[in-house]
């Protein structure tokens, strides 16, 4: 029996969810920002939760104004009135065109928008929530690689070496302070992330409102904190993951070659090996493409999914994809890693196989090393990971289960949505199962790429699946809350 979930009820659930976070943020004691962790703090527990109070640093006036608006959404008549008002405003905004000149449009999307985000990344007040010092130490000791992210650390080293060759000016100042240099590289990765995301949004959707919704939802999540302050290599990884998503969706639609999908996932994995978590979705791309062709009448017969999956193993696309995936790894290994085995930070290829204790996953039953704070099936693991997701992508955390109830058949029936769902599932499994050696408080950036791919499914449903009359309502509530959430983290 399928559970019915009306659109109006879904909006009210979202409003109550946001209201609860704001309410918790009003308490004088510091909480990590979510109801589950609030209960954990109130009723006991020995976890060292990170002290991020999402709304504790915002003014009381702002929190009261936001709470008042959310309470209005819970009143049926006011709810309907707001829907009509926002729908009218949204319709006018969508019809408005900055310019019909293609050059102006191109500059707005590909130059002005990324440059504006780059300025925000660079000029934001300097602070960090992650484990810092590793890459500054590497640059100071002329080490080239970290085992789990060889390409990104090598790129950092090359850029730093080039900056040191200058005798004065901006790059010379950066080279004299490695921590500022690494931050500037993260800012630059954010520029490319926004550039690639804008290109993806502009080309995947025909309607302007869909482009805006998809871009805005993925451009204002908590994981964007990576590009402001992160002293790690995950900003590079995330930028290439966006290209993997873009070309994978285009391949499913028959608009691109699978070489690009495999190449960008391979580069992202070399930036950080965590990207290999998304390999299953890559190998299912030929099957999903054939499904879309069959639904469009391009295939003569429709076989069961399992037979179609097995039938794609020996196709040219699969062979080309596998070679493209492996080739960058072999080139990096042969020409960079092997000649410089003494240049690894930490020795013996660093943390390639799971960090300090050599274990990648949380234990099922017993904690055995100093790097394991709890077991995989424990309450502590669930509470801390949910708390982290409330920091990285709070609207994804609430909209994903609601959409799974409301739009389950649409998601399963659409090959593109199913591709994003596969990534969502493997991203969630990675977050739940992985052992963060530094602790989730410092290793939140390790889980940011998974949060991005989980959010991509929600953004796609917001853009493609929700009925037209609810576009402005659900989408604007979700996007404006995400912007408020990100600005709070930066305050």
Image (cartoon, rainbow, N blue to C red):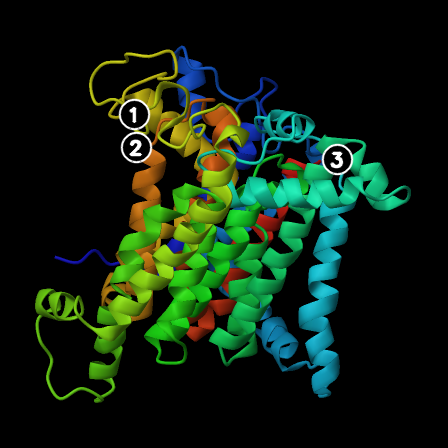
Between label 3 and label 2, give the one nearer the viewer: 3
Lower sequence index among marks 2 and 1: 1
Front-most of 39 and 379?
Answer: 379
Separation (CA) of disc 2 from disc 1: 6 Å
Q: Does 1 sit above or below residue 433?
A: below
Question: Residue 345 location in percent, x, y?
Answer: 53, 27
**Quadrant where the C terminus is found in the figure:** top right
Q: Residues within 10 Å of mark 2 (few under 14, many from 20)?
A: some
Residue 235 in percent (x, y) is at 57, 46
Mark closest to the chain's N terminus, 3 or 2: 3
Q: Element type at marker 3?
A: helix
Q: Which mark is residue 362?
A: 1
> Residue beneath label 2, please?
433
Residue at the spot 41% in from the left edge and 20% down from the top edge: 356
Residue at 8% across, 71% down = 304
- Vertical placement of 255 versus 325: above or below? below
Q: Disc 1 and disc 3: Cα gap in Å?
A: 34 Å
Tag 1, which secondary structure? loop
- The tag on residue 180 is 3
Residue 402 picture location, percent across and down: 34, 52
């Amino acid at each position: 029996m399928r559970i019915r979930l009306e659109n109006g009820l879904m909006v009210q659930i979202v409003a109550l969810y946001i209201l609860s976070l704001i309410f918790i943020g009003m308490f004088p004691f510091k909480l990590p920002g979510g109801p589950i962790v609030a209960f954990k703090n109130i009723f006991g527990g020995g976890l060292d939760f990170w002290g991020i109070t999402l709304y504790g640093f915002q003014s009381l006036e702002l929190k009261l104004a936001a709470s008042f608006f959310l309470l209005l959404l819970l009143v049926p008549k006011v709810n309907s009135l707001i829907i009509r008002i926002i729908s009218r405003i949204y319709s006018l905004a969508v019809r408005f065109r900055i310019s019909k000149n293609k050059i102006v449009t191109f500059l707005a999307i590909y130059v002005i928008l990324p440059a504006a985000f780059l300025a925000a990344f660079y000029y934001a007040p300097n602070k960090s929530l992650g484990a810092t010092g590793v890459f500054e130490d590497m640059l100071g000791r002329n080490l080239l690689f970290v085992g789990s992210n060889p390409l990104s650390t090598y790129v950092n080293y090359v850029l730093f070496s080039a900056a040191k060759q200058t005798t004065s000016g901006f790059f010379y100042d950066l080279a004299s302070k490695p921590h500022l240099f690494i931050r500037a590289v993260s800012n630059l990765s954010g520029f490319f992330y926004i550039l690639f995301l804008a290109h993806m949004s502009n080309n995947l959707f025909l309607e302007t409102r869909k482009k805006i919704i998809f871009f805005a939802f993925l451009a204002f999540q908590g994981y964007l904190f990576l590009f402001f302050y992160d002293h790690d290599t995950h900003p590079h990884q995330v930028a290439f993951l966006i290209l993997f998503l873009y070309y994978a969706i285009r391949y499913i639609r028959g608009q691109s070659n699978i070489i690009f999908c495999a190449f960008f996932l391979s580069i992202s994995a070399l930036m950080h090996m965590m990207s290999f978590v998304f390999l299953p979705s890559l190998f299912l791309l030929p099957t999903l493409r054939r499904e879309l062709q069959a639904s469009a009448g391009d295939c003569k017969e429709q076989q069961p999914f399992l037979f179609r999956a097995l039938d794609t193993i020996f196709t040219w696309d699969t062979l080309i994809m596998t070679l493209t995936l492996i080739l960058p790894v072999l080139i990096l290994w042969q020409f960079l890693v092997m000649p410089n085995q003494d240049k690894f930070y930490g020795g013996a290829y660093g943390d390639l196989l799971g960090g300090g204790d050599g274990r990648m996953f949380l234990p099922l039953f017993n904690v055995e090393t100093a790097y394991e704070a709890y077991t995989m099936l424990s309450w502590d693991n669930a509470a801390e990971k949910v708390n982290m997701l409330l920091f990285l992508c709070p609207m994804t955390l609430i909209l994903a289960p609601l959409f799974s109830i409301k739009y389950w058949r649409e998601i399963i029936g659409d090959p593109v949505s199913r591709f994003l769902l596969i990534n969502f599932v493997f991203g969630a499994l990675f977050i739940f199962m992985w052992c963060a050696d530094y602790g989730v408080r410092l290793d939140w950036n390790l889980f940011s790429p998974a949060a991005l791919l989980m959010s991509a499914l929600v953004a796609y449903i917001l853009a493609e699946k929700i009925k037209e009359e609810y576009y402005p309502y659900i989408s604007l509530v979700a996007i404006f809350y995400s912007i408020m959430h990100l600005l709070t983290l930066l305050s």
